[in-house]
Amino acid sequence: MTAPLHQRHRAVMPQWLALYYREPLELTHGEGRHVFDVQGRRYLDFFGGILTTMTAHALPEVTKAVTEQAGRILHTSTLYLDRHMVELAERIAALSGIPDARVFFTTSGTEANDTALLLATTYRRSNQILAMRNSYHGRSFSTVGITGNSAWSPTSLSPLQTLYLHGAVRSGGRYGRLSDQDFIQACVADLEDMLGQAHGNVAALIAEPVQGVGGFTAPPDGLYAAFRQVLDQHGILWISDEVQTGWGRTGDHFWGWQAHAENGPPDLLTFAKGIGNGMAVGGVVARAEVMNCLDANSISTFGGSPVTMAAGLANLTHLLEHDLQGNARRVGGLLTERLRAAAAPLAVVREVRGRGLMIGVELTGPEAAGQALELAREHGLLIGKGGRAGQVLRIAPPLSLTVAEAEEGAALLERTLRQVNGGEPA
């Protein structure tokens, strides 16, 4: 047990369990928008445990809720009534925009999407799913089967037949040079063509309003509304994967689907990550007739546990009372402008994109992104990485980020990018 922790990790964990950095980082505690490693060094956290620490590290309201509930009872299961679960479900149902909504809690986004697929395929009596190219929906057998990013899809086996659509990547590709309106029209034509090739009923379209692992790419506003018009003609359900886009992170909207709301809300909405602020909470919202279509028993042992529900309720209350969506819009807009100005003269940066506090910086390749990840850490800034080839830096700090912290992080990232570009010494 005296060997270095990394060595012990490699000896007992799967080799495919990825770690960031050449010398992996052990984080011991956090406070606000900062985390600390085992040596006591402080880092500005611009990734939040993969968009999961949504409000702040060690948020007092959440810590208190977890501690008090843990002191009463840790676990009961969904076989018993739980007040926190009902109250959180009531609030999420009301916020979802889905009429006559029902909520089922899970322990992760993967499980939430898996449940949504079960509901949609059962309701429609079809195993055919429409998904977007470059997408990511989880690591279970079913969600890997609908993931359109080969870097995160380790097997071609699947219980589903998946048909992949154009539209989620606005820049580049066959439609990249079109205007937004023409882009949407071309993607709708692609959808109609794909449906013409499908055999029988298609169950659902599942789509991230802003692709997370895919590199924070997004279509023009209104694309999924245009898709919805076609889907409704065939009775096909729309599942909005809000695991990374929910709870106001995009600033302009509380849910990502609201940028595509012209033809109404989705039939199903999945969520996870930020609502628990680090606790394992996920779930599905669906209109009642879809949620209630299962004709066999189903429960959840750990979904909706007393402790995680108490945490989620406290976290959501804090987010709403402090208008963190508004903060994401204001501070995120400032941060995006700052990064675009810094990146403009740098050949290594292809694009800075995003909404609110969900910002992607696309570089010329995965080597540049890997170098930027390491250098940013050296400067005291933690960021993420994604994209089809791992060429995109993912910026997603807690939604309580201050203007001063945004300026500090932008300066650190500018210094990093200049070094990667070859214009500044290490």
Image: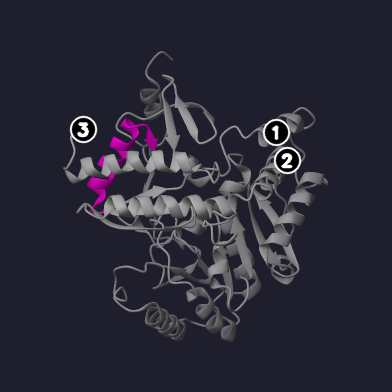
Q: Amino acid at mark 2?
A: Ala
Element type where label 2 sits in the image: helix
Classify residue 410 by image quadrant. top left
> Residue placed at 43% from the left, 68% from the top?
132
Task: Compare marks 1 and 3 and give the one earlier in the sequence.
Answer: 1
> Residue placed at 49% from the left, 41% from the top?
48
> Residue placed at 52% from the left, 43% from the top?
398
Above-or-below relation of 259 to 410: below
- Residue 66, which numbered label? 1
Classify residue 400 by image quadrant. top right
Q: Which residue is mark 2?
A: 310
Residue 394 at what x, y percent from top left?
39, 49
Q: Which residue is mark 3?
A: 426
User: Label 2 near label 1: C-beta < 8 Å?
Assistant: yes
Snapshot colouring: one colour
Residue 376 at what x, y percent from top left?
32, 37
Q: Answer few, some or many: residues within 10 Å of disc 2's Cα (few below 14, many 20 plus, some between 14 and 19).
A: many
Q: Amino acid at mark 3?
A: Ala
Distance CA(mark 1)–CA(mark 3)? 43 Å
Q: Answer few, some or many: residues within 10 Å of disc 3's Cα (few below 14, many 20 plus, some between 14 and 19).
A: few
Q: Quadrant of the N terminus?
A: top left
Residue 384 at what x, y percent from top left?
39, 44
